[in-house]
Amino acid sequence: MISKKVLLAVVVSLASFVQAGTVVRDQVEPQQYLTIKADVEKGTISKNIYGHFAEHLGRCIYEGFWVGENSDIPNIRGIRKDVVEALKKIKVPVLRWPGGCFADKYHWMDGIGPRKDRPAGINTFWGGVIEDNSFGTHEFMDLCEMLGADPYIAGNVGSGTVEEMQEWVEYMTADIGAMAQLRKLNGREKPWKVPFFGVGNENWGCGGEMSPEYYADEYRRYQSYVIPFPGNEGMKKVACGPGGEDLHWVEVVMRKAANKMDAITLHRYVFTGSWDARIGKGSATSFTRELWVKLMENTLRIDQNIDNVVEIMDKYDRGKRVELYVDEWGTWWDQEPGSHAGFLYQQNTMRDAVSASIFLNSFNEHCNRVKMANIAQINNVLQAMILTDKEKMIVTPTYHVFELYAAHHNAKLLESELECNPLTGSEKKVQSLTVSVSKDDSGTVNITVGNIDPENSAELVCDITGISPVSVVGKVLAGEQMNSHNTFENPNDVKIEALSNIKLDGRRLTVSLPPHSVSLINVK
């Protein structure tokens, strides 16, 4: 029989837990622990967070999309069928074009009318090759319609004029007037819907080497002529934001122009080397565990980067009207040996896939401000979804991450809390897991988890409140090695497979996550 003294000690102990707000769990604490409140919604994850970016750079457009009507590669009106069909599987919601640095030297009238009459120029930013302008406004809009994606146009502030930008908007979206008549003569009767228009790109760098004060004044001038015509009234005007952590740029542009914009951008690239070409950014496929850890440390800084930008945005936009678009992001490595200089062609391994899971989970968690993100880039450039070699095509590990994460499109972000081990080998003691949780319209809870540890599996215990789960299934993207990747000779070395070792017991879910993996768990 328990004595009164012992019973009193137990009561006091329990009371102290309650006063401290501590949840009493099992006696043996799991090392990796996730709690989910399925009835607490924190915001809506815009599908546009899963957007993409296509620039006239290397083989992104030419060969990646455009092969011409007379090509032996199967195509629809010059756009290759295999790439379109693959991208439709990941539900591309929005596509940014024509750049990038290329946007601020692009003169849109060069890319309309009969292709045989379009003037050729030199792509001075990327490789010094001839740009024949065979892929222009009509071809891009046709591509977007094939993909079911919204177009996001980047306008030329660096070398263009206000008149040129205003006439491009009119050409695309007006139903009457001289530019509308020109569009109709070129074969498009109805105006297109253009939901997003960027007023310049990286104007602190390749877009004109501007100071933030100068750009803010130019932005105000240019945007005043970006006029939404009837039928396109909801077009969002997007201001150029910082590259990485240049908070002074954010401060100045928000202070001077916040009331004239609907969104501001952020660009974030990660690697393990240096911007200095003499040092290089590192190899895409040959790297050590130490370099894996360094890349993950760099990627995980995205959370603080976004928080710092949003803090300044809140200062000048207390109503939180202005949206944040991370419209260039991803890994950037030295281009593949033997590839054309300036084409930025790189392979794509499980390291890139896990890095992408960190980025995407962060964007989800910031969904009340981050309303769009566009990975760089969609084909054959940097962290691409698709690689082509003439008629051949393969998908990359990052493509499969977007395939898994499509479950989050327009879903409700749920409140969750993760407790996990630090990543071994990290001097910064960063986390070993990255997680995001949402609930879709069917009531299914979707959990995406990246196991950042390249060597050790993770035993994850998850407690779910707010629903009564009845079933669970999972999928995983792993690969045998941390540098596993797909090649034209072996296109399926890295692919999505069923996630085994997953169990649901009441409201508790347990799962074993392979090392260097990205998983999707669906709880119904």
Image (cartoon, rainbow, N blue to C red):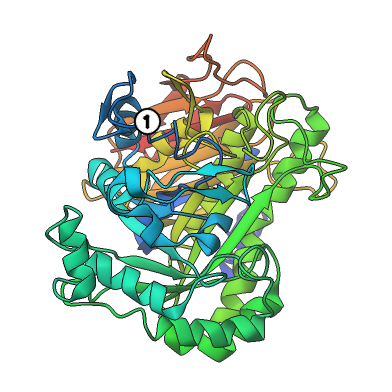
Q: Is residue 313 visible?
A: yes
Residue located 47% across and 40% down the image: 378
Q: Is residue 9 above or below residue 313?
A: above
Q: Say what secondary structure mark 1 lies in.
A: loop
Q: Is residue 412 visible?
A: no
- Count of numbered circles in the view: 1
User: Which residue in the structure is indicated by mark 1?
Assistant: 67
Q: Quadrant of the C terminus?
A: top left
Q: Quadrant of the N terminus?
A: top right
Residue 384, position as x, y percentages in the image: 52, 36
Q: Residues within 10 Å of mark 1 (few under 14, many from 20)?
A: many
Q: Is residue 215 above or below residue 323?
A: below
Q: Is residue 34 above or below residue 190?
A: above
Front in this rendered view, residue 495 or 124: 124
Front in this rendered view, residue 224 or 13: 224
Residue 119, position as x, y percentages in the image: 43, 51
Quarter location, residue 483: top right
Outermost residue toward the top in this view:
489
Residue 206, position as x, y percentages in the image: 65, 62
Front in this rendered view, residue 493 or 78: 78
Residue 502, position as x, y percentages in the image: 44, 25
The three-letter amino acid code for the residue at tag 1 is Val
